[in-house]
Image: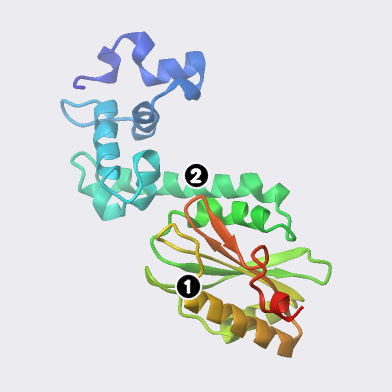
Amino acid sequence: MNGRIKELPKETRPYEKCEAHGPGVLTDSELLAVILRTGTRGENSISLADRILQKADSSSHKGLAGLLHLSLREFKDVPGIGRVKAIQLKCIGELSRRIATQAVRPSLSMDRPDSIACFYMERLRHEDQEHLYCMMLDIRAHFLGEAMISRGTANATLITPREIFIEALKMRAMGIVLVHNHPSGDPSPSLSDRDITRRVYEAGRLVGIELLDHIIIGDQRYYSFKEENSLPTAKEQ
């Protein structure tokens, strides 16, 4: 689609369509075109948006979700996308993650693995590396805060109980929940996942901080050691 947006019939222009009917009627390309604002010489912003989405389709996720997997360099490889537009696109992706996380924050329940998984899902399921978070709770299981313990490779997060309990002791936590993601999208626990769960549980008994769950985030799926009765405490009962 060539030519300027202003040369299109008024009813097909993204701004006018949004103003008249709301953003829900816009296509993915039109939504992206509104963010981009301008295209390139001889090409309007809708056409440029189409090419960006084609680039995103080459990632591990299709469509708009693929934008979260493109680096600044990959955005700038698209003709017509310079430094400023590339940064804008990366920031839009981060903004969407934060909005999704904040939207589920009021319903976060620390005694429900599905609630915790929902809280972290959009933040972690698009990551290309493993991230491990420690959620810290008081004696009444109220959420005190979280700490990112490590950011690993595409295959494994290298951690020890020491890093986890340094953070937990800082917040005077009485219980913790570990949360990490599997970039493959499959949340099934590995042998190393089971090993670190056991080690953290055992260390927690020594310092008086209970490991309440370990949740693995996949792509719209999760695994909870608590739900699956795989925590060391469940085996002892």
Residue 190's tag is: 1
Tell me which colouring the rendered structure shows. rainbow
Left or right: residue 73 versus residue 134 is left
Query: Residue 91: x and y, percent?
Result: 42, 48
Query: Residue 79: x and y, percent?
Result: 18, 41
- Under circle 1, the secondary element is loop
Which residue is painted at 60% across and 56% down in the image?
117
Q: Nearer the viewer, residue 198 or 109?
A: 198
**Quarter of the image with the C terminus in it:** bottom right
Label 1 neighbour load within 10 Å: few <14, some 14-19, many 20+: few
- The first of marks 2 and 1 along the sequence is 2
Residue at the limit of the structure toward the right, as seen here: 140
Which residue is painted at 29% across and 27% down in the image?
46
Residue at the limit of the structure toward the bottom, as seen here: 206
Q: Which residue is mark 2?
A: 96
- Under circle 2, the secondary element is helix
Determine whether label 2 and label 1 are within 8 Å by CB: no
